[in-house]
Image (cartoon, grey):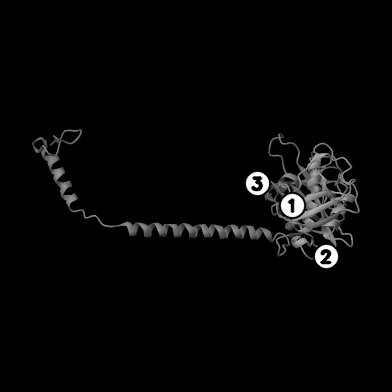
């Protein structure tokens, strides 16, 4: 039997005469069910459910956080880490990426023998991350006292193409505080790596003092008498700032004076009264090789670097100019510097090791500065 109930909106409930038997039965059933409903206060139940949900979310977040710490901590064991967060390494040598520079690579023994240094992935605003690694340094820039007594001091040089900053640890002079010794070494321009250079001129009377929360550099008028080249003045200023703040283990601003007086320009370029470090990624080379160790049939390379998604490239080229190895190695990502390490299996011979940031722009960004080292495998 077919149902004669019409389709469309239900009729007016006040007009019972217009309802079919089926519609009337449906209305009565719904009314009876509604009459049985008794509202209750579920606010506290809702609140308790919400709190439980938040606790579960926080628990999962904590688990994720621990996992991240484990990953980061695990990475730190790749190198020797000091209690202050620095990583013990040795001085680097540099040149441009092998495809973009013809500068001759530096020569080293089977194991690098440069003075010990530190390599840090800390932000550029913290100069303490690049303090000295040897000698007994006493005091800090706080209260006008600068560290002294280190046997080696950090000095930044200009190298690569395009020009970037690279660091060596050099033997400290005697009788001065560490920042003064580092400054004088930088001005003398005697880097151990021939790929490094400096536009500054020697000034054996230059000094660094601490006053009023600033590191005060006093130079002679001859110190910036050379040429920094097109666009090189800013990098030269950063070379000085990085050197002085690293040796002082301080992020205090730097004031440069010439013959005891404030000077508004260096290398013909106007400078601020007080200077601070530019971001590391802007001025520092994306890859430093800090140690190269050769053993029978292998080369182990360690360094510090940053690249897009953390991927640097390395190559090994033999004395005949033939590339015998090429691969990727993980370092810091997207402007954050972190240590890297790799081992390549090669037969006996002399090789040039190069580490550089690959060009991810399809050639639009131009070449990137790299680092090289020459090593002999027994």
In this rendering, the label closer to the viewer, 2 or 1: 1
Res 98 visible: no
Identify the disc placed on residue 200.
Answer: none
| Image location of residue 3, percent across then percent down | 14, 36
| Image location of residue 168, percent across then percent down | 82, 54
In depth, the one of 209 and 27 nearer the eye is 209
For residue 16, side relative to residue 105 (left or right): left
In depth, the one of 363 and 248 nearer the eye is 248
In this rendering, the label closer to the viewer, 2 or 3: 2
Identify the disc placed on residue 253.
Answer: 1
Q: Secondary structure at mark 1?
A: loop
Q: Would you call the spot at circle 2 few (<14 residues within 10 Å), some (14-19), or many (20 or more)?
A: few
Q: Secondary structure at mark 3?
A: helix
Q: Quadrant of the N terminus?
A: top left
- Sequence-earlier tag: 2 or 1: 2
Res 50 visible: yes
Label 3, on which residue?
A: 309
Mark 2 vs mark 1, CA separation in Å:
25 Å
Identify the disc placed on residue 135.
Answer: 2
For residue 348, side relative to residue 335 (left or right): right
Q: Residue furthest left?
A: 17
| Image location of residue 76, percent across then percent down | 68, 59
Mark 2 vs mark 3, CA separation in Å:
37 Å
């Amino acid at each position: 039997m077919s149902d004669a109930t019409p389709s469309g909106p239900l009729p007016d409930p006040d007009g019972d005469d217009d309802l079919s038997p089926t519609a009337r039965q449906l209305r009565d059933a719904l009314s009876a069910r509604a009459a049985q409903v008794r509202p209750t206060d579920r606010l506290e139940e809702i609140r308790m459910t919400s709190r439980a949900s938040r606790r579960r979310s926080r628990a999962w977040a904590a688990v994720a956080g621990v996992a991240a710490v484990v990953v980061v901590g695990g990475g730190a064991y790749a190198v020797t880490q000091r209690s202050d967060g620095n990583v013990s390494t040795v001085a680097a040598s540099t040149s441009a990426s092998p495809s973009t520079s013809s500068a001759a690579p530096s020569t080293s023994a089977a194991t690098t023998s440069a003075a010990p240094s530190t390599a840090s992935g800390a932000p550029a605003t913290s100069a303490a991350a690049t303090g000295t690694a040897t000698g007994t340094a006493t005091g800090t820039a706080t209260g006008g006292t600068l560290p002294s007594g280190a046997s080696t001091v950090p000095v930044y040089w200009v190298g690569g193409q395009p020009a970037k900053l690279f660091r060596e640890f050099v033997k400290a002079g005697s009788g001065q505080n560490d920042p003064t010794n580092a400054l004088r070494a930088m001005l003398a321009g005697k880097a151990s790596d021939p790929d490094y250079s400096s536009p500054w001129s020697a000034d054996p009377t230059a000094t660094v003092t601490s006053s009023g929360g600033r590191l005060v550099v006093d130079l002679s008028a001859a110190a910036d008498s050379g040429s920094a080249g097109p666009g090189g003045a800013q990098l030269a200023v950063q070379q000085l700032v990085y050197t002085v703040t690293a040796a002082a283990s301080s992020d205090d601003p730097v004031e440069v004076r010439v013959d005891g007086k404030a000077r508004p320009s260096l290398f013909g370029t106007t400078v601020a009264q007080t200077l601070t470090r530019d971001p590391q990624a802007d001025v520092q080379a994306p890859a430093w090789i800090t140690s190269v160790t050769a053993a029978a049939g292998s080369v182990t390379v360690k360094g510090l670097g940053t690249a897009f998604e953390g991927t640097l490239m390395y190559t090994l080229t033999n004395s005949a100019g033939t590339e015998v190895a090429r691969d990727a190695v993980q370092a810091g990502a997207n402007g954050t510097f972190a240590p890297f390490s790799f081992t390549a299996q090669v037969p006996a011979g002399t090789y040039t090791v190069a580490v550089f940031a690959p060009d991810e722009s399809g050639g639009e960004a131009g070449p990137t500065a790299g680092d090289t080292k020459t090593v002999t495998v027994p």
